[in-house]
Image (cartoon, coloured by chain):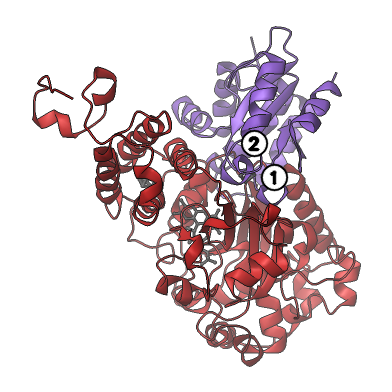
Amino acid sequence: MEFKFSEENLQKIELVLKKYPTKQAAVMPVLYIAQEQNGWISKEVMVETASILEMNEEDVFGVVTFYTMYHKKEMGKYHIQVCTNVSCMLRGGYQIYDAVKEKLGLDNGDVSNDKKFSLEEVECMGSCGTAPMIAVNEDYFENLDKEKALQILDSLN
Amino acid sequence: MEKIVLPEIENFHQLDVYIQNAGYEAAKSAFTQTTNQIIDTVKKSGLRGRGGAAFSAGLKWSFMPKNNDKPKYLCVNGDESEPGSFKDRQILERNPHQLIEGTIIACYAIGAKSAYIYVRGEYHKWIKLLQKALDDAYEKGFVGEKMKETFGTDFSCNIYVHKGAGAYICGEESSLMNSIEGQRGYPRVKPPFPAQNGLWGNPTTINNVETITNIPPIIKKGWEWFSAIGEPKHPGTILFGVSGHVNNPGVFELPSGTLLTDIIYKYAGGVIGGKKIKCVIPGGSSMPPLRGDKLEGVKMDAESLKAVGSAIGTGGIMVMDEDTDLVRVLARIAKFYYHESCGQCTPCREGTGWMLKILNRLVRGEGTSKDLDLLITIAKNIEGNTICALGDAAAWPVKFMIARFREEFEAVVKDEVSLEPKNKVHSMRHTANPIAPVQV
Ligand SMILES: Cc1cc2nc3c(=O)[nH]c(=O)nc-3n(C[C@H](O)[C@H](O)[C@H](O)COP(=O)(O)O)c2cc1C
Ligand code: SF4
Ligand code: FES
């Protein structure tokens, strides 16, 4: 599918470019802008980003594949991230992860057929003091237990 | 005890409240001093980096070349991805202006016209809060071209927020710079060090968010004041983040050298259910764990922790009670480093994977006692043989957890070497000797 940045986003990119002495340095913020518009980073997004920033396509591809937060496929409307690292694990992170997996019928990295949910087991999110936690898209939910986590899922529609 | 980094003042994150409390006056006074004076003050204060290595901040600044026409840069490290660390987030939320003011002073001291504050991508909310504070500071003329007028100086600098995208390795200083440059976040071989060859090949200084936030009070109140707080060799307060099996987890700003047991029992409310402690990791998951029966008298500062065989790291204290399965904990830690290894160096890329596989075997109850020695051998072969310190960070927990809690690991392994096919995969000891049927 073809990808072009919207007018509004092209203006945002202009502002981003002012922050750095090279165009390439803008690749991470520009990819975020693209992801917001397109939902994920498709091949066409990378080609367009490379063209705007006068970069090699391979280099853009290299950046996209290095960082976990650029989605390489279409994700669910609600991207559920469950932290299972040590501080969360000590306070029930895996119970939450297992319950969420079961409820959504998804495994790590899966997207539901109706594209409503996707699931990711994530590394420490910086919520160790308010563990365990899940994140839904950009929002953190902390101090959870299994029941609260499932309630959060129920509240999403 | 006075709070330096996280003052308990309501709405301190708002610019007007910050100004009412003498905000941006440290910057004003800094501009009346020479850059050498400021670097000298920071050196004498004894301030050491809060990002992991506890290196002298003033000394680091003094490495920046003076007579050099190249543009200079400051990077402020808010990548905060070390498991067990959640303190910089508090600063972004509760005290962003002191971070910005510290950034301005640091820029002036090292001659940088641009600073990048690199914040981990998952911190969407805190990036917005920081950006809001920065926008306000620009508008009031504390940052950017207008600061010349505000402060009556001919110096000005710009501050930008750069959002990471989910790579722990980008907290490593040279990886962070590659990431800002728009490349894959591979650490660089050192030397050259950032002060010679950093961002875009220019002289660059990099400091942690908490380190920089300490600067304005030091300039305001003087190095004598700061150096008298806490342990003389590592003075000041430290943000200790306590997590795990405690009643009251959270971030506590306390003088360096505070007793670890005081932090756990007085501030973090003690262990849940009054249980005993089996293990404490005192500085984030990369740091060597301590035994619960050896915590008495342990002080939380770089030198004291070194003396007991660990390190202060990021001050992230992970507490594990007597019922914790340390084999599973170590396997989870190993999974993290395996996931985060950037893959440039063979020992780190391969070793983290081997360690994880063997530890998972232990978790499944299929390990043998030789696996324990094998794990230590692999860890020792990673340590010191890699481009960046992630290799050491992956090796230390394995090496020290097994050495210090050997009985926990012995308890889950079988004595004999089992040569069942599923067991020999990825185990180096078989490569030299062809597999012969062994009677068990
Ligand atoms: C794998 C790895 C990850 C790191 N992550 C961070 C981090 O998230 N934040 C940080 O401030 N320093 C981190 N560091 C340390 C930095 O490389 C650097 O030493 C530090 O930011 C310097 O700041 P300071 O001197 O003020 O402590 C990391 C180091 C390594 C090897
Ligand atoms: S030690 Fe590991 S993370 Fe660091 S550069 Fe080598 S492979 Fe990458
Ligand atoms: S371990 Fe889960 S947020 Fe830190």
Instruction: Pinpoint residue B12: horizontal percent, then vertical percent.
Output: 85, 67
**Residue pictured at 59% horizontal, 77% vertical:** B256
Q: Is residue B337 left or right of residue B73?
A: left
In the picture, the disc for residue B204 is none
Label 1 C-beta lies within 8 Å of the nearest ligand 3 atom: yes
In the rendered view of the protein, which quadrant contains the N terminus of chain B? bottom right
Chain purple in the figure, letter: A
Label 2 C-beta lies within 8 Å of the nearest ligand 3 atom: yes
Q: Which residue in the structure is indicated by mark 2?
A: A93
The hue used for chain B is red
- Residue toward you, A26 or B149: A26
Indicate the amino acid at tag 1.
Ala
Indicate the amino acid at tag 2.
Gly
Which quadrant of the figure shows ligand 3? top right
Q: Mark 1 or 2 closer to N-term?
A: 2
Q: Secondary structure at mark 2?
A: helix
Q: Is residue B230 visible in this depiction of the protein?
A: yes
Q: Secondary structure at mark 1?
A: loop
Instruction: Pinpoint residue B258: horizontal percent, then vertical percent.
Output: 61, 76
**Residue pictured at 70% horizontal, 77% vertical:** B216
Q: Which residue in the structure is indicated by mark 1?
A: A131
The disc numbered 1 marks a residue on which chain?
Answer: A
Q: Is residue B152 visible in this depiction of the protein?
A: no
Instruction: Pinpoint residue B379: horizontal percent, then vertical percent.
Output: 30, 47
Work out which residue is located at the far top of the displayed protein and give it.
A113
**Residue pictured at 37% horizontal, 55% vertical:** B400
